[in-house]
Amino acid sequence: MIQKIANSILFFCAFVSCQKQVPYTSLTGTAQGTTFTIRYQDKEQRDFSQSVDSLFRLIDKSMSLWDSTSLIRRINRNEKDLKLDQHFINVFNSSREISDLTDGAFDVTVSPLVNAWGFSYKKGLPPPDSSLVDSLKHFIGFKRVMIENGVLQKQDPRIELDFNAIAQGYTVDLVSAFLETHGIKNYLVEIGGEVRASGVNERDSIWMIGIDKPVEVASDERLLQTTIGLQNKSIATSGSYRKFIERDGKKYSHFISPETGYPVQHNLLSVSVMADNCTSADGYATAFMVMGLEKTMDKVKTLHLDVYCIYADGNGMLKTMSTSGFGR
């Protein structure tokens, strides 16, 4: 349920509220297994909380792995002739494009491996042995699924889909589009750290967004590596420093390589992607965490994306590398 809170301070934005002729409204709450904050300026001072709730429910019924009745869960159970909704099709097509442009590093059919390693909605499983990983790899691959006449077709019934790495970004875009259709020009939408900002904040300045320092801290604590200005752009951050499993003293990243079937092992700790839409930013952030620092910095040259990478050098010290959109 959404709470309507006036004059709140966004936890990730560096600004101080001040009185204006047209006040800002803040909606906060939980959705999609995380928290969200939506802040907007509306001269009519409309409360969009019910509409936003409806959008969250719409996406959950389409793509949530936590809802056993969702479309994606029914597809994974191989129920026959399920007609896809437009949101599912949009996310599928965006996922395919990102997969193609990252040489398969982003792959929404990696779900069986994610589950086998104890992530997603199946928790607490021991690490799979090499024979299980090898067997699961036989039905991993985005090119083995396609949409024909509005229905998803699989080459193998054991293929499962997982949109968790892109659905939040898509939801940010959906809520942003809703606000814009209602004439809202100054707003910020954040879901689970994925953000889109338009126009200006209460101080008549561009929105300032914090990027976390990739270190382990208490759940209610936050250390910032840097802050960046965001205007009419989206940003998504992925990192390996908070979401992992530990077995026998060893940590396993939740980023699984579709090629090897194993959690990635490299020195890239966090990557933030700035793009025109949050769907792309979200998907590419995951792909780059799979690819690692060197491949990412090489790939963004052809994708025309801006990235901010935080990595550990040979001595374990935090270092950064970024493109011009983030400054130097």
Image (spheres, grey):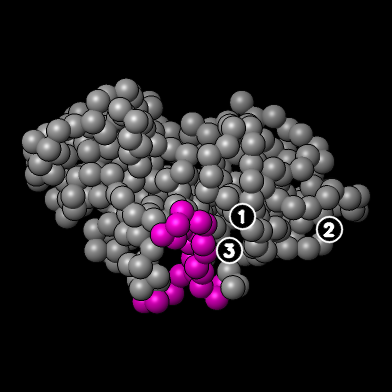
Q: Which mark is residue 208?
A: none
Q: In the image shown, does 233 or 226 lie closer to the viewer?
A: 226
Q: Quadrant of residue 288?
A: bottom left
Q: Quadrant of residue 45?
A: top right
Nearer the observer: mark 3 or 1; the answer is 1
Magenta-highlighted residues: 301-325
Q: Between marks 2 and 1, how big is the CA–CA gap? A: 23 Å
Q: Secondary structure at mark 3?
A: strand
Q: Residues within 10 Å of mark 3 (few under 14, many from 20)?
A: some
Q: Which mark is residue 203?
A: 2
Q: In the image shown, does 165 or 130 lie closer to the viewer?
A: 130
Q: Secondary structure at mark 2?
A: loop
Q: Position of residue 156 (x, y in %)?
A: 9, 41
101 left or right of 44? left
Q: Position of residue 138 (x, y in %)?
A: 9, 44
Q: Secondary structure at mark 1?
A: strand
Q: Residues within 10 Å of mark 1 (few under 14, many from 20)?
A: some
Q: In the image shown, does 33 or 130 lie closer to the viewer?
A: 130
Q: Earlier in the sequence, mark 2 or mark 1?
A: 2
Nearer the observer: mark 2 or 1; the answer is 1
Q: Is residue 50 above or below residue 292?
A: above
Name the amino acid type tagged 2. Arg
Name the amino acid type tagged 3. Lys
Name the amino acid type tagged 1. Gln
Q: Is residue 274 above or below residue 210?
A: below
Q: Earlier in the sequence, mark 3 or mark 2?
A: 2
Magenta span contains residue 317? yes
Q: Work out whether residue 60 can be spotted.
A: yes
- Mark 2 and mark 1 residues within 8 Å of each other at the beta carbon: no
Residue highlighted by disc 1: 225
